[in-house]
Amino acid sequence: MNEFASTLPEGAKVAIEALTSGIFVYEYLDGKRIEVHLAHPVYVKPFAKKHVKTDKVDARVLAQLLRMDYLPESYVPGEDIRDLRTIVRHRASFVRLRTSIKNKVHALLAIEGVQPPKVSDLFGRKGMVFLKEVELQEARRTALDVYLEVRGILGKKINEVEVVLREKAEVTEEAMGLMSIVGIGFHNALLALSELGEIERFNKPKSFVSYAGFAPKVEQSRDYTRYGHINKHSNGFLRWALIQSTRAAVHSATPNRFQRIYNRLKARRDEKVAIVATARHMAESVYWVLTKKESYKE
């Protein structure tokens, strides 16, 4: 990397795809005060030659787009936001792994026809006593023990990350505003803020909803408009945070607007579809809270 940077003439501009390795290159070159642009991989594709995917072709396409000032760029937040994003994504990944482990435990019990005890949390104190003692076929019992051990390790690591998060993360007015929305807690507020960066990037709610992954694909011609499935070319972590927050709001003891929306949708759609559709409304609420700089009002 040092060798590459040293060959660049003064005033050079560099364009790279916004892939995982691209972030390292961006930060390195940016630290060297070299002008670097992150190309959005989804929006660059239409400019590339069909069915051809080589570094040489990609480099030429990126260079040409940059030269013509047509390069579709990915948003790059400041260093502080990138650091916060790293920590909250780290925690979110652990939480997702832990949820996956819980689902596997439920699946093991279902395979053996075991009915869990009626407790508020199967992985709470009483539930864990049951899980450690329940009799299963030998291989499944071994698998269950491993799942419980891994879940315990993940729980400890999540707690460690949360300590770092509370030390490093400043609870800003924006975070407090998001936490005024029923269902959005401390961690998801910080995750949402670190992922969206600056709300001013979005000039209307529809743009933010699309970025969060809750807008359907639209195909239009002179004669018709067709709405397809939800657009998945979005920010996956932001989408996950809003879906988790929507679930929390729907199951909240406090009556709220999201419960009413969800119950109305659930009457004619399945649970997952209803949650995602309700999350779209939460995304709009997030947009307005941050744009108006005021607390959420029902």
Image: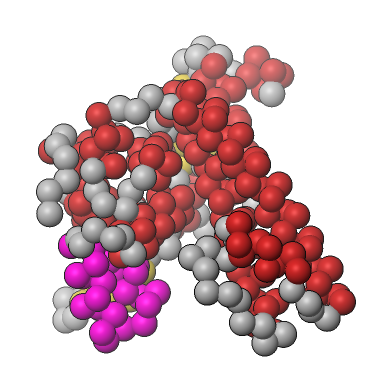
For residue 115: magenta? Answer: no
Instruction: State which region is magenta.
Output: 257-279
The extreme right residue here reads 138
Q: Quadrant of the C terminus?
A: bottom left
* Looking at the image, residue 9 lies above or below residue 73: above
Q: Quadrant of the N terminus?
A: top right
Q: Residue at x 32, y 74 (%)?
A: 274
Tell me the chief SS of the magenta region: helix
Percent position of residue 201, x then y: 26, 38
Is residue 114 rendered to the left or right of residue 212? right
Q: Residue at x 67, y 83 (%)?
A: 114
219 or 295, nearer to the observer: 295
Percent position of residue 209, x then y: 27, 56
113 or 90, nearer to the observer: 113
Q: Residue at x 28, y 60 (%)?
A: 253
Percent position of residue 294, x then y: 14, 37
For residue 265: magenta? Answer: yes
* Looking at the image, residue 74 lies above or below residue 116: above
Is residue 88 rendered to the left or right of residue 242? right
Is residue 74 rendered to the left or right of residue 124? left
Is residue 134 rendered to the left or right of residue 82? right
